[in-house]
Amino acid sequence: MAANKASRVISGRYPPAGTSQIGDAIRARRGARGITPLDAALLHVPPVAGGWNSLLGAVRSQGKLPGDVRELMILRVAAINRAVFEWIQHEPVGRTDGLNTAQLYIVRDEATPLPPAPGILTQLQTSALMFADASTRNVKVGETLTIALKRDLETLAREQGGENVEERTEDLLAEAALVVATYNMVSRFLVAVDVAGLGDDEVPWPLERMEHFVDISSSHKIHAIKITVSQDAPWIVLANSLLTNLHMWEYLIPYLISDAPDTVSGKPRKPYNILIHSQRGHGKSTLPDDSETTITTLASDMAQLLSSLEIPTPVHAVVGVSQGGAASLALARGYPEVTRSVVACDTSPKTAPGNKEAWAGRIGLVYGGVSPEEILNEGVKGGQVGKGADYAVKVGMGKLAAATVPRWFPKPSKCADGEAEKGERYRWVAEMIEKTPVNGFVVGAGALSNYDLYQEDEKSRRLFKSPVDRVLLIAGSLDGGGNVGKGLQRLMDEWNAVRCRDPKAKLVQYAEIPSSGHLPMIDEVELFADVLRDFVDSF
């Protein structure tokens, strides 16, 4: 527990009861908790400790902001400033005031750009979160965010009834700013003097989130994170696209861990445990030294990952997008025993005509204007092709990002370049692409350039013979000008022509996400989550 650890900077002062008027006043406010490590640190300067006690008592218990909004703002400050003690003290208060695990996950996830995905936080919670985030990071809060919070606070003031709505709205706005300012002060003191000895700890997540680096056949490591809501919850595995990493799923995760009732039917929904991982050569996952990377070996990585992490199989679902979608189909083909269902998004069962040359052209772009023909004939020569490996890292991947993200998020996607609502996501994905290891991209592009899951080989049956119970195919309506969706609909029809011969087999389903591109779980995550949850909740 935090209270049992000592600061490595200052000793703390714990005056016995009756020996310090200020200490006794703090005890009176704290109740059964007594003097906390924070109080003990402050009592090195008693007059400040006394004033602090009065200020924090007023901010915490004498204002008019709803408790969930106040605690959400405090916890966002703690997450950004790495104030572990602050988070530990306030997460239980936040839960008592109504914040659930999915909402707390969004608050804790300070690395994923705002605004958060809709539907998990209320409108007031969202505007309060964005205000607290901007105030903490930038000090000055922009006019747009201030107006948004004031608008939502005015709605609250009207719902509360009474006169002087405008005055009460301004009072609430001032209180919100004071909450953020006060707890920024608190967090900076906590971190500076290492209150409770937590300065090197990670801010906790509101559920178990464990990071792993798993050896795969002693040849490479896969970076994975297990997100566990309970030991009894079903597991969903998420596989990233080429040029991204495991963090691409962060907008979706709150929907999958949520046990909030269905917004239409009102029925309770079950939460899921989640396994996210970066496919080999992406994020912090490494590449094998000498073995070939194919779509089939990516599926093998997933099967071995489940075994190494001792995740019970069959898991409830494996969900992949793009390269991860192809790998998920390959898993259904080669390792059907490890999953009850597969969801393949914005992908294809085989390399499309012309794609081999297209991928060679993208590799050539990274290395500085090398022709597709040269890449196809000679490869990258250990990074010595074109302008070389250093250029590829420092310049080439940025050029690839600039060419790729507009294709992934074409207008009218809300993540398209220049769009105000979700423009930060465009830049976030571009940064993921730029940071992708060059060799990881080259190897992944090679895998996508030459695969055919329709074919049977020595290790895998034909795709249509897979005994996996359920299959869902999903495409963003804008992906490839609609051609990706048409291809997946053809796959559904071909697959169902085989499945319909078995009266017990469940037909493959297809769903299209409107106004979304290649990564619908990013640009239209609420719609994507609705489709996915309807599918996984149905069995």
Image (cartoon, rainbow, N blue to C red):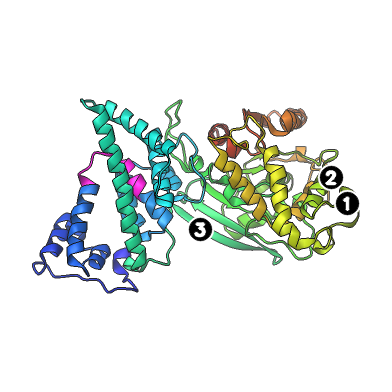
Disc 2 marks which amino acid? Answer: Lys
Disc 1 marks which amino acid? Answer: Leu
The residue labelled by disc 2 is 356
Viewed as shown, does residue 335 lie left or right of 462? left
Q: Residues at badges 1 and 2 in contact (C-beta under 8 Å)?
A: yes
Residue at image point 89% right, 57% down: 378
Callout 3: helix, strand or loop?
Answer: strand
Residue 479: x and y in percent read 70, 33
Residue 355: x and y in percent read 82, 42
Query: Which label number is shown at residue 210?
Result: 3
> Mark 3 or mark 1, which is nearer the start of the sequence?
3
Viewed as shown, does residue 6 lie left or right of 332? left
In-front residue for pair 351/79: 79
Callout 1: helix, strand or loop?
Answer: helix
The residue labelled by disc 1 is 376
Residue 180: x and y in percent read 33, 48
Quadrant position of residue 473: top right
What secondary structure predominates along the stretch shown in magenta? Answer: helix
Residue 288 visible in image: yes
Query: Which label number is shown at residue 29?
Result: none
Q: Residues at badges 1 and 3 in contact (C-beta under 8 Å)?
A: no
Quadrant position of residue 83: bottom left
In-front residue for pair 58/273: 58
Specify the segment rendered in magenta: 60-74
Callout 2: helix, strand or loop?
Answer: helix
Q: Is residue 329 above or below residue 304?
A: above
